[in-house]
Amino acid sequence: MMKKQFLAGIMSFTLAASMLAGCGKDVEIDESASGRSKEIESVDNSESSSEASSETAAESASTEDNIYEAFMNGDVKVKYQNLPSKGGDALSDYLEDGKKYDINEIIKCIEDDHNTVDGEPKYCYIDCGEDGIKELLVKLDLGASSSLSFILKEFDGKLKICYSGEAWERSDLSISDTGMISSAGSAGATAHGGDFAFVNADGDYKFFYSSMTEGDPYSYYAYNEAGDMVTVKFEGLETEHFMITRYYIEDENGEDHPYYTYDMLDEDYSIITTDECFDESNPYMQRFIEAGINVYKQNEIDEMLTKKADEIGYPGGYHPYSSDEEDNQYGISLVSMEHTDVSSLCPDDQFESCRDVSLNDITGDITEYVDGIKGTRFDGHLAVFRSKNDSGDIIYSFTVDGKEAGSCIHETHDFKTIDYIQAKDIDGDGVAEILIVTYTYSSEPIIAVDFSALRYCQNENAADGSSYGIDTCYHLNNDFSWGNAYFYIEHDEALTGGNVVYVSLEDSGLRVVVDKGKKVNGAYEFDTYDVVMKLG
């Protein structure tokens, strides 16, 4: 069974590192030349004959382009060898160390482990380490928002697997055109994080670090200096405004070593940690001391990461997150905010435009009813589907011309919801942005439980190994690394504590109405702020 593996990390560092992982231009996938030229059933299982034909094909490939194409056509094999770092070796769950495989045999091994590879393999060329020598990035779609990607490099006419990783519904995988690798995911409502690595010009996989943040911890499992797992108990302490982050950094022997820090939060969940918070007299610090756990200040961990980045040659080095860079980290900018009565902007008007939308299950193709699609370049090409995961959250999946283009998740919190979907070009690039709003009728007034604005990148964005991409560039819910609206709404003095009651794409930008009204003598009185934001 495919393993659902991911490491998670503190929100600010997930944001910063996702920007690092995306440095350089996005790569382009060549799907037209990909595919299996041989059916799995017709693969010759004779070890000697298959290896001989594989080596002959490899010798005839005069450039890395030719051997990569030959591999994708099923004519060349790669000798699989376990990588020193398990974190970059997802194929170890399916392949035998020291055995040779062609693309069809790799697929068969994965499918033999109760997976299904959907469609043809996708691939593109990348340049790890930016030395001008191509590597091959291959992606296998496994359905249900899952995939497996791996990087191949040619050495003297033979292929080597440099890295392999998996993505699934709650764990994203990003591979840049320069070989930088990051993943981000959620282990639940209060646990988030990511891990960061890269493949260098020599084809070596280098793990940088991973981190996971857990909020509101009643108790916490951690490793002491002896390597024993112990429980840190916070019984009797207020933990709603307290969170712990664990970092894993490799030591000189290649062993992961955990480092712990924590943060105090104010009523708006902003970090207010000071050096005094780490005094031995601090009641939270006392619990760690009692459990035999060393706790470090964030600047001490930053120093470790800076040294580690220099040691392994992490491209661009390590740059600690700075609150001064919040606007850039969140990826949006405030265009205008006006305290005025705009309560007349009612979601009911939006629902009228999409009243025929059927979003009950994955079979609900809503392309014909998406507001604003008609007349755009999406017309006749974009399809949107809705399904639910095991937690009851809504998954929106996008296809363009029948090809998977991306997905996003909205948390519904068990509310009765209705969806509004709009497409409109608000940045003037000729391609419409997509807005999805999940409203709930479980409140008065109607509020947006969650919303996302997405940017479509045709024949770009191969960070996930696909030739089509939907970039989620804006999201309300802070469970996601792109939760940039959360900064403005929850950390703006005027807006904090308000509810989003209306969202739309307009010529001026993304319009968000935040309401801080209340009931007076049994009647609800709006107190609205009209906010316009610019994406990207």
Image (spheres, rainbow, N blue to C red):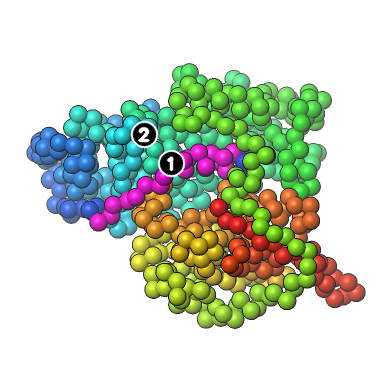
- Few, some or many C-alpha atoms within 10 Å of disc 2 (few <14, some 14-19, many ≥20)? some
Q: Are marks 1 and 2 in contact (CB under 8 Å)?
A: yes
Q: Against 43, is 58 above or below?
A: above
Residue 298 sits in which quadrant?
A: top right
Q: Nearer the viewer, residue 285 or 19?
A: 19
Q: Which amino acid, by three-letter code, is at mark 2?
A: Glu
Q: Is residue 82 visible?
A: no
Q: Is residue 334 left or right of residue 9?
A: right
Label 1 belongs to which residue? Answer: 24
Residue 515 position within the rendered picture, expressed as x and y whole percent measured from the top left: 76, 65
Is residue 425 magenta-colored?
A: no
- Few, some or many C-alpha atoms within 10 Å of disc 1 (few <14, some 14-19, many ≥20)? few
Q: Residue extending furthest front?
A: 428
- Secondary structure under tag 2 reads helix
Q: Nearer the viewer, residue 188 or 159?
A: 159
Q: Which mark is residue 130?
A: 2
Residue 484 position within the rendered picture, expressed as x and y whole percent measured from the top left: 62, 51
